[in-house]
Amino acid sequence: MTAYDRYRALLRKLLHVREGHPEGDSPEEDALLDAMDEVWSEMTDGERSAIASERARALGLPESHGTDSAPAPQG
């Protein structure tokens, strides 16, 4: 399974957990978000770009045109 596939699976799981806990954060949600951060760092720019819209919707973020919230490397 690729990092992209793992990230999509984590996004689906996150949505399911949030449905079960509409009042807010849960320990399971926090663990999923941590796992998602790890997998995100393993993904290529192309994979990040391909999942950007789905990620934004799942996380309740505005859709951006970039692939990451980190600034572009200088140099």
Image (cartoon, rainbow, N blue to C red):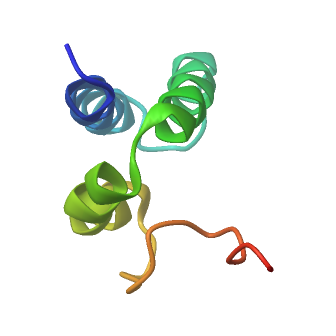
Q: Quadrant of residue 50?
A: bottom left
Identity of the residue drawn at 49% across and 32% down = 42
Residue 32, placed above or below residue 66: above
50 left or right of 75 in image: left
23 left or right of 70 in image: left
Q: In this view of the protein, which residue sits in the foreground, 44 or 48?
A: 44
Identity of the residue drawn at 54% across and 22% down = 35
Q: In this view of the protein, which residue sits in the foreground, 57 or 74?
A: 74
Identity of the residue drawn at 69% across and 68% down = 70
Residue 45, placed above or below residue 4: below
Which residue, as the protein is rendered here, is positioned at the far front?
A: 75
Which residue, as the protein is rendered here, is positioned at the far right?
A: 74
52 left or right of 23 in image: left
Residue 40, placed above or below residue 71: above
Q: Position of residue 30 (x, y in %)?
A: 62, 28
15 left or right of 18 in image: left
Q: Position of residue 25 (x, y in %)?
A: 60, 37
Q: Position of residue 1 (x, y in %)?
A: 19, 13
Residue 70 visible from this viewpoint: yes
Q: In this view of the protein, which residue sits in the foreground, 45 or 4?
A: 45
Residue 54 visible from this viewpoint: no
Identity of the residue drawn at 41% across and 39% down = 43
Q: In this view of the protein, which residue sits in the foreground, 13 or 49?
A: 49
